[in-house]
Amino acid sequence: MTPTPKYQKAHEQHQSVVSIGKATIGHRHEPLIIAGPCAVESYEQLRAVGDTLVSIGVPCIRGGAFKPRTSPYSFQGLGEEGLKLLAKMRQELGLGVVSEVMCIEQIAVMAPHVDCYQVGARNMQNFDLLKALGKQQKPVILKRGLAATLSEFLNAAEYILAGGNPNVILCERGIRSFDTATRNVLDLGGVAWLKTQTHLPVLVDPSHATGVRNLILPTTRAAIAVGADGILVEAHPQPEKSVSDAAQALSLDDLARLTHEVGLMTAAMKECDKPLPSKIKPIRRQHRA
Ligand code: PEP
Ligand code: MN
């Protein structure tokens, strides 16, 4: 008999909480923001991001050291040197560190430097990698595959859970569809659906979902409104000079604004979650003649 999937909610209140460094995500905690450059480029770049994160109260930094690039001739990441720079942000600033793992051999190389592994969209169904991540306890952010159904997404998470690692965070990052106006199509209905099916925390990545800097704030607001447990977002001290994904990199000022707005949206959603007093009249909009 097939066992009951470990990702499934046992009851409506059943929600997992996952820790990354000192930060936590899931179960009505304040939404977690994880921000940083697409790729680690230099100490100066990371430290400028890290200083901003500390000043605006964002506890986790992201940055790719091993980069999955469409072309083999594009920058492939700084590798282990990049990991050491990320680890400095933990030592110097106390930030939790998130970085992408692309193959089984990198798990051990990354372990001393990161607090959370990210499995990228292109590796969502790399089952041997998922099994290997199931055998260790560090948290894993699993990104939805470029053309993965939500059921395939949950089954990929199940590989990690079934191996014995309960610390899985799902991340909706947009899917391929017929429309090319945005880089991908952000499936916010899917985020709401996932929250009905699983106790696992769900992140939204508005950067890869839209690919457009100006679309990141509005989609972040919407992500919080549908119940996302956090936001994974790309930011760079000089966005236009970013070696990868420059068009979607937020400036550090924009990142501060995003963080402020996540707080506003969270407060608004708490109001929406309150039961309506029996006598209250619903707010009506004025209709113009
Ligand atoms: C990334 O987060 O830098 C990345 C490569 O994302 P994705 O796997 O979603 O394309
Ligand atoms: Mn990127």
Image (cartoon, rainbow, N blue to C red):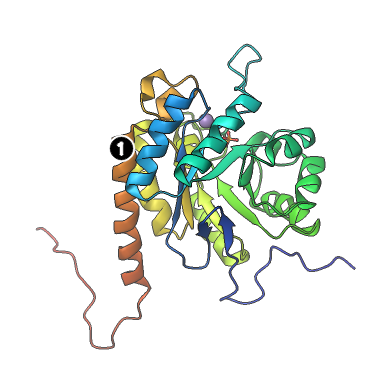
Indicate the secondary structure of the residue bearing disc 1.
Answer: helix
Which image quadrant shows ligand 1? Answer: top right
The x, y position of residue 136, in whole percent, is 76, 51
Quadrant of the drawing holding the N terminus:
bottom right
Q: Residue at x 61, y 61 (%)?
A: 200
| Residue 207: quadrant of the picture | top left
Q: Is residue 109 left or right of residue 97?
A: right
Q: Residue at x 52, y 59 (%)?
A: 25
How packed is label 1: few (under 14 Cα within 10 Å), some, or many (20 or more)?
some
Residue flagged by tag 1: what amino acid is it?
Answer: Asp
The residue singled out by tag 1 in the image is 254
Position above or below: 278 against 220? below
The x, y position of residue 224, in whole percent, is 41, 56
Q: Is residue 130 visible?
A: yes
| Residue 145: quadrant of the picture | top right
Position above or below: 236 against 268? above
Q: Residue at x 53, y 40 (%)?
A: 174
Q: Is residue 143 visible?
A: no
Q: Residue at x 39, y 58 (%)?
A: 225
